[in-house]
Image (cartoon, rainbow, N blue to C red):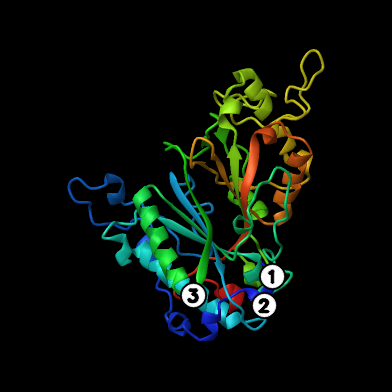
Amino acid sequence: MGDATHVLPSLLRRHLFSGAAALAPALLSGCTAGTTHTPARAGGNAAASRSDAVAVEGARQAGVDRPVQPQPHLELAIFDVDGEVPDGNRAAARALLAGLGDRINALLAGSDPLLAGLPPGDLTVTVGAGPRLVRLAGERLPGAEELPPFARESIAAADRGGDLMLQICATDAQAVALARMSLHNWLTARSARARWSQNGFRPPAAAPGPVRNLLGFLDGVSVPHTPQEMSQEVWLPAPAAVRDATVAVVRRMRVDVPGFLALDVPRQEQVIGRRRADGSPLSGGGPDAPVDLGAKSARGSYLVPAMAHVRRAHPAETGSGLMLRRGYSYANSAQDQGLLFVSFQRELRTFTQTQRRLDDGDALMAFTTATASATFLVLPGFSRQRPLGAALFG
């Protein structure tokens, strides 16, 4: 990967981004709530014709806590920006991100020709900058730290790290695919290089809340919910360069789904620490009850087993805060399926302390192998007055 002097392409040094830098991103009005899209033609995709656009204009990017219920389809695409530039070439980084913001704005407004007339619907595109890019703005900034290796990993060099993250989500899988193609073409035309990508899916949900993963359990029960919890656990308040940003961790976790499902349901519940039927903790109470790590049976044994996943990942056990997790399932083949883990937190240590605790002993980890891993700073929101990346490189 190299140091911060190997971040942006030689193409930038030839000023091929100067045109993109001159284009001020338009307001993201094409994605504000209440936008009316052209109805789909007869026989078209009904999901694409809904007026369900996600409000993205503001201090923070969409795709983190908006929409509250994540869209059913996701494409996560990781890129490197090749070549060498002089150390601290902030202008080049600013031009790249501003141009990318322009392209995203065209997608969200429905004016990108590669959408082929398809209304964007609830499409969101969330951009993260990898540690090499962040270090151009400051070696000590949140997001400048690399994600370390952990146990139970089988990760090729190309599937670890990266300079840019695009998280593309929508109800319409076709909108996700076309948006991904548009942004891929734009970036690779400017000497960015695709590292790895993964599509994912979630079951549809009638109301905001956790949904079932491939193991049949509800995923994402213990996360920050209220604005106060989000401010405390997810959004960065300072310094000014990263205010309203957040640190993302993405991990592709191959899961031995057949092996787990071969266990009887009581044993599955002991591995997870929750009831499969409704997500209730084994310590008692309903689905919304907090996990009581001290609860014991009449015989004195812990109701939540010592190696249950909810115990090992609990903040009381890890000494860290809560992560906002927006996970997706994936299924590349019968031998390669599992969880596309996406979490947002103020500090990288929130994730690393939790993962190290899981590495020390967690019954669920015996069924998982990480095959891709990276961390990114999800940049503050952008608008006409504040291009993407302006706070970091302005």
Q: CA distance from mark 1 to mark 3?
A: 24 Å
Question: Residue placed at 72% from the left, 38% from the top?
Answer: 314
Q: Is residue 59 shown left or right of residue 140?
A: left
Residue 32 locus on image (x, y percent): 38, 60
Disc number lying in front (3 or 2): 2
Disc 1, SS:
loop
Name the kind of residue labelled 1 in the image: Gly
Residue 184 sits in quarter: bottom left
Name the kind of residue labelled 2 in the image: Thr
Residue 294 locus on image (x, y percent): 78, 27
> Front-most of 150 and 40?
150
Question: Residue placed at 78% from the left, 22% from the top?
Answer: 302
> Disc 1 or 3, which lies upstream in sequence?
1
Question: Residue placed at 56% from the left, 31% from the top?
Answer: 257
In the rendered image of this protein, does residue 261 appear above or below residue 200? Answer: above
Which residue position is annotated with label 1?
Answer: 2
Q: CA distance from mark 3 to mark 2?
A: 20 Å
Name the image quarter holding the C terminus: bottom right
Which residue position is annotated with label 2?
Answer: 5
Q: Are marks 1 and 3 in contact (CB under 8 Å)?
A: no
Q: Is residue 142 shown left or right of residue 386?
A: right
Which residue position is annotated with label 3?
Answer: 98
Disc number lying in front (1 or 3): 1
Name the kind of residue labelled 3 in the image: Ala
Circle 2 crowding by C-alpha within 10 Å: few under 14, some 14–19, many from 20: some
Q: Is residue 102 visible?
A: yes
Q: Is residue 57 shown left or right of residue 373?
A: left
Circle 1 crowding by C-alpha within 10 Å: few under 14, some 14–19, many from 20: few
Residue 67 locus on image (x, y percent): 46, 50
> Front-most of 286 and 6?
6
Q: Are marks 2 and 1 in contact (CB under 8 Å)?
A: yes
